[in-house]
């Protein structure tokens, strides 16, 4: 029986090995995705959880389609290999066309619509009015974070004043009193469970701000100030990486997000106010 | 052979053009190779215009985006006064071209050549006028990189002028052919379509430059 | 009586004459078949360069301290890695995936399949090729100029690509040459598309209505329309980029840039404008890369299942739908770019919609196999492989089509896995399937079938081994275009996956040597091929192998039926060619049905 599976007219048929490989491939892929051998790290915000839910929904639907299509291919090549039979002369079936067009339309567009909320929560709604505002500036190849300080106001920036070796990497105007208490650091520290709004800027080329655990990623574009917001609900130290090709130091450009307790955050601000 | 509809245009290739399965050229030969119907040159020119139009639409979209930036550094520029005259010249050249082709169809060879030449000369005047326009811009210290409005001015006008230069070359090449040349009707038609397109395109660009100043 | 001087003259002139004839026949030819072969061999050269570049990258990612060939200085620096990456992408996308499926096979077989003697504009066709070749030479020159090749990726985002040398090595002359090469390529492509569209519209054989065109012709036709519209936009974007680089304009360069401490004098341009213009071209470009492969796969599946394409009309319509929708989805490359988030949602819904005609095509391919009599010659194996890869790659795209999910996957290796599976694998399988299928027609010889099968198995398994693990690198946060994993700490944990992929890549690349050997050996020593070795129904199979200069020796066919009349009930043979008049029995020559 195996020999008949292997053979077809004229040559040993690859039909069985092909079908077997496709089945194995489907099993291995499903296992790899389900077993989460190299998972993304756990989410640390409500918005991130919504993203994960949408990812899971997409995985189920596309996974089902993947299994059906690949196994269907495996079955077809095995069952209909040339064994001397006559091929069925069918031009097509309108009912089938309508069926699979509608099903895929509903499934795919439905997925797209279902994903709206996860996107809307992060992007359509503005940051809460009591958010902690922190400015993020990127340039080749570092992140610089600026807090407004006790007065709650950012000092004016002037690109012509940028002078990192002299200690003014952002170009804060020394004549602006609002800038005197600005805190400029290279790590991002925020308190847990409080809304944060980041104002993303770039000095030279497009960079990016990406924290995996927040499921938050945004390009930083020179000439634009782009706001993003999040509320972290888990303390810890998380990687900030640059994902937009920015030059030869692109792979080394990274920083850290420190989510700390409220009291630690207050101490951080006090320490920095003293240091700056 | 005007295409009445897109479908007719597409279906034309499906068997009606070469009469019975033995393509030996439409309208008496003189084709590049066996079986190339004359209509294909018209189709080709229309397609080329589609590409050229997309190119200018990309530039115009860039202009729209740039113009519409809030807090932008858009400074109005004063357009060179000669542009209006240039527009009239180019528009006039379209009319002389129509006249020339009508005369060709009617069989008046000398008159066709006369008005065909006038068209080419008007085209050259247009180009000279555009060069004068650029010099007028230089005189007011508006160069390519001076400000966004001036950048777009030079890009639009230079891109258009290069196409006009190509058009003049085409007019010269076609106009130098002997009148008995079997494909002259098609060649003049193709060149005319291109030329009229450039005139209409210029009207579009000119309107944008004036209105969007 | 012959004079000695005349004899001497003959001896001197004969080789010159032969050279002139050779040049006229094989180099400066206006014959669409020669031009198609010129594109084919150019793409073969380009894919070799592209593959070497990819192996250099894969090697470096896993053994960063290794001394690599072709790398100045031996050990690859980050800027060299980025230059290799940029050129790999550029060469593969433009000179392989845009050239082989459309310019090579389309040029060769479009006139044949519609029963025409040549393309509509043969001299324009020759000019197109020479422009593409010139573009390739200019692109390769970027490797050898001071500073080397550009480092901004094939996407050349501004301001990085617009700043010039201060942005990094390779951003001076290298980036400029890149831009010039692309501009030349655009013109060549535009001229080529005009040829394809005009030929398809005006030069079809009598009786070949739109609905009797092979699906390959549909695919080349729609692809050419995409090309015409998309490359025109890229040309405009390229001009503006060159002006920003050399003329001090600020189309894409914002004000207030501080690069390496130096304030730049640009004013008020928009980096996002470059992205919009680029991706307005870039997304149709990927459909330009895949649509011809889809056409070829439909064609081959029918031929080797001995059945009509299931749902021919739906397939033709799906090609048009994919082409049309392909122009409306470019924003899905820009979800996190700073673009308006509401636009993002709109682009997202349009993008998932494009999955519908793609799914329709997949179901119809399965339907074509269903109930068939499948013969597993090499072309068929690669066509089946295409279907598998298109399913995998297409479905992974559904994740990226949703902005919320894309937020975590954008610019990670997940994206790299997705586009490699659809472009770098599926589209390549389309090219390979077409090569095995049409080799006998093009060269009058057969390729070795056993080597073809071995090539298929090693490649099919090999590329899944390379690109499936890549999804997991991305999900875990492995970032693309990273020269090394010395940045964030978590990257080191992904090295085992990288090692597996690199080894798979080396094995798979080595397997391609089998293909090259088979190809070049069969050119000279392959068994002579029949006129119709696969018992196909379409018009290319009635021309000689290879076809004569005017394709049909003066006896141009007329068409009486659709392109995939296989196993028609009541017919004596299982294929009914398009050109046989009705009433004539199609049951001749049923020997050689199994070309083995």
Image (spheres, coloured by chain):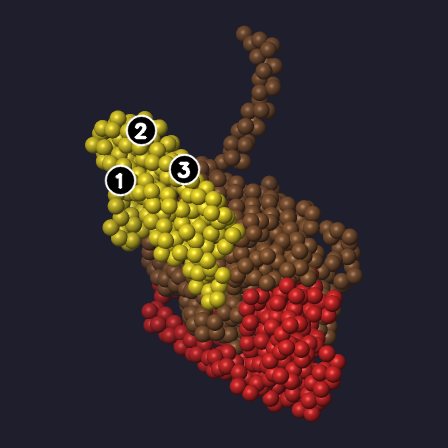
Classed neighbour count for the residue bearing mark 3: other residues with Cα under 10 Å, few (<14), some (14–19), many (≥20):
some
Chain identifier of the residue bearing label 1 in the image: B
Chain that is coloured brown in the picture: C
User: Whole-percent x and y of residue C535?
Assistant: 44, 51
SS of the residue at dot 3?
helix
What residue is pinned by disc 1?
Answer: B95
Lateral position of residue A195 relative to residue B94, left or right: right
Structural crowding at the residue carrying mark 2, measured as other residues with C-alpha within 10 Å and reported as few (<14), some (14–19) or many (≥20): few
- A72, B118: nearer the viewer: B118
Q: Residue at x 53, y 86 (%)?
A: A129
Residue under label 2, please give it.
B181
The residue pinned by badge 3 equals: B128
Question: Circles 3 and 1: CB distance less than 8 Å?
Answer: no
Supply the letter of whichever chain is red: A
Q: Position of residue A148 (x, y in %)?
A: 63, 80
Q: Nearer the viewer, mark 3 or mark 2?
A: 3
Horizontal arrangement in the rendering, residue C484 relative to residue C197 (left or right): right
Q: Earlier in the sequence, mark 3 or mark 1?
A: 1
Residue B113 at x, y percent in the picture: 29, 29
The mark lying in front, picked from 3 and 1, is: 3
Q: Chain B is drawn in which colour?
A: yellow
């Amino acid at each position: 029986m195996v020999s008949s599976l292997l053979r077809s007219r004229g040559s040993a048929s690859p039909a069985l090995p092909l079908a077997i490989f496709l089945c194995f491939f489907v099993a291995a892929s499903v296992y790899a995705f389900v077993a989460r051998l190299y998972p993304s790290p756990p989410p640390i915000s409500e918005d991130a959880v919504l993203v994960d839910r949408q990812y899971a929904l997409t995985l189920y639907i596309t996974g089902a389609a993947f299994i059906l299509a690949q196994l269907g291919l495996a079955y077809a090549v095995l069952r209909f290999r040339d064994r001397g039979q006559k091929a069925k002369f069918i031009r097509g079936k309108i009912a089938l066309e309508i069926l699979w067009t509608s099903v895929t339309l509903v499934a795919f567009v439905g997925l797209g619509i279902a994903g709206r909320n996860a996107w809307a929560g992060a992007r359509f709604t503005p940051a809460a009015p009591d958010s902690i505002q922190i400015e993020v500036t990127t340039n080749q190849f570092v992140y610089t974070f600026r807090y407004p300080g006790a007065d709650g106001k950012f000092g004016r920036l002037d690109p012509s004043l940028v002078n990192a070796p002299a200690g003014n990497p952002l170009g804060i105007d020394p004549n602006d009193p609002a800038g005197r208490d600005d805190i400029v650091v290279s790590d991002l520290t925020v308190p847990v469970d409080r809304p944060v709004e980041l104002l993303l800027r770039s000095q030279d080329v497009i960079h990016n701000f990406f924290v995996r655990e927040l499921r938050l990623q945004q390009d930083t574009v020179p000439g634009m100030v782009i706001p993003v917001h999040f509320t972290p609900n888990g303390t810890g130290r998380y990687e900030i990486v640059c994902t937009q090709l920015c030059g030869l130091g692109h792979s080394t450009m990274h920083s850290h997000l420190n989510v700390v307790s409220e009291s630690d955050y207050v101490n951080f601000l006090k320490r920095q106010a003293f240091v700056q | 052979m005007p295409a009445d509809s897109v479908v007719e245009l597409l279906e034309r290739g499906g068997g009606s053009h070469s009469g019975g399965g033995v393509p030996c050229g439409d309208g008496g030969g003189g084709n590049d190779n066996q079986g190339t119907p004359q209509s294909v040159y018209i189709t080709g020119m229309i397609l080329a215009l589609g590409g050229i139009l997309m190119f200018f639409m990309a530039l115009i979209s860039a202009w729209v985006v740039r113009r519409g930036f809030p807090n932008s550094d858009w400074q109005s520029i004063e357009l060179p006064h000669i542009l209006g005259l240039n527009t009239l010249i180019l528009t006039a050249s379209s009319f002389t071209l129509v006249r020339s082709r009508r005369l060709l169809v009617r069989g008046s060879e000398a008159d066709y050549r006369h008005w065909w030449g006038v068209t080419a000369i008007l085209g050259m005047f247009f180009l000279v006028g555009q060069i004068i326009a650029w010099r007028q811009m230089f005189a007011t210290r508006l160069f390519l990189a001076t400000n966004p409005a001036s950048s777009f001015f030079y890009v639009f006008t230079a891109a258009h002028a290069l196409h006009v230069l190509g058009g003049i070359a085409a007019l010269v090449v076609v106009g130098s052919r002997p009148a008995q040349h079997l494909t002259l009707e098609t060649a003049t038609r193709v060149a005319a379509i291109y030329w009229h397109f450039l005139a209409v395109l210029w009207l579009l660009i000119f309107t944008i430059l004036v209105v969007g100043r | 009586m012959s004079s000695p001087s005349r004899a001497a003259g003959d001896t001197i002139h004969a080789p010159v004459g032969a050279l002139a004839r050779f040049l006229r026949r094989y180099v400066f030819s206006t014959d669409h078949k020669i031009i198609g072969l010129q594109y084919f061999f150019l793409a073969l050269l380009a894919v070799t360069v592209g593959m070497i570049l990819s192996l250099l990258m894969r090697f470096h990612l896993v053994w960063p301290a290794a001394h690599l060939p072709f790398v100045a200085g031996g050990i690859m620096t980050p800027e060299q890695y980025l230059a290799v990456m940029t050129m790999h992408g550029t060469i593969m996308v433009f000179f392989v995936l845009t050239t082989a499926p459309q310019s090579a096979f389309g040029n060769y077989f479009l006139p044949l399949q519609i029963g025409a003697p040549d393309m509509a504009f043969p001299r324009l066709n020759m000019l197109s090729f020479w422009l593409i070749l010139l573009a390739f030479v200019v692109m390769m020159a970027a490797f050898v100029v001071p500073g080397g090749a550009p480092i901004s990726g094939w996407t050349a985002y501004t301001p990085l690509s617009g700043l010039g040398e201060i942005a990094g090595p390779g951003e001076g002359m290298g980036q400029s040459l890149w831009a010039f090469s692309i501009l030349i390529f655009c013109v060549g492509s535009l001229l080529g598309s005009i040829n394809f569209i005009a030929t398809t519209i005006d030069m079809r054989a009598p009786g070949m209505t739109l609905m009797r065109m092979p699906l390959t012709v549909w695919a080349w036709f729609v692809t050419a329309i995409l090309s015409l519209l998309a490359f025109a936009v890229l040309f405009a974007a390229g001009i503006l980029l060159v002006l920003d680089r050399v003329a001090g304009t600020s189309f894409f360069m914002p004000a207030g840039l501080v690069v390496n401490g130096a304030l730049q004098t640009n004013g008020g341009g928009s980096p996002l404008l470059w992205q919009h213009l680029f991706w307005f071209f870039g997304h149709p470009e990927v459909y330009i890369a895949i649509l011809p492969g889809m056409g070829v796969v439909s064609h081959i599946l029918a031929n080797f299942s001995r059945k009509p394409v299931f749902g021919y009309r739906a397939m033709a319509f799906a090609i048009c739908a994919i082409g049309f929708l392909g122009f409306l989805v470019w924003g899905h490359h820009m979800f996190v770019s700073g673009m308006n988030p509401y636009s993002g949602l709109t682009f997202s819904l349009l993008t998932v919609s494009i999955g519908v005609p793609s799914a329709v095509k997949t179901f119809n391919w399965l339907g074509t196999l269903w109930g068939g009599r499948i013969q597993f010659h090499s072309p068929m194996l690669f066509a089946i492989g295409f279907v598998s890869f298109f399913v995998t790659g297409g479905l992974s795209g559904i994740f990226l089509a949703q902005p919320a999910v894309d937020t975590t996957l954008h610019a990670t290796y997940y994206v790299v896995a997705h586009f490699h599976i659809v472009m770098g694998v599926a589209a390549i399988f389309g090219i390979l399937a077409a090569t095995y299928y049409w080799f006998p027609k093009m060269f009058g010889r057969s390729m070795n079938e056993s080597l073809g099968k071995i090539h298929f198995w090693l490649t099919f398994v090999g590329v899944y081994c390379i690109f499936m693990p890549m999804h997991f690198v991305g999900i875990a946060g492995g970032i693309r275009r990273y020269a090394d994993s010395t940045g964030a700490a978590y990257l080191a944990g992904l090295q085992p996956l990288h090692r597996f992929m690199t080894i798979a890549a080396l094995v798979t690349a080595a397997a391609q040597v089998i293909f090259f050997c088979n190809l070049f050996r069969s050119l000279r020593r392959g068994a002579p091929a029949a006129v119709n070795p696969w018992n196909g129904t379409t018009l290319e199979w009635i021309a000689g192998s290879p076809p004569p200069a005017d394709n049909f020796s003066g006896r141009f066919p007329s068409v009486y039926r659709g392109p995939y009349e296989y196993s028609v009930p009541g017919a004596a043979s299982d294929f009914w060619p398009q050109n046989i008049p009705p009433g004539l029995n199609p049951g001749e020559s049923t020997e050689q049905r199994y070309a083995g």
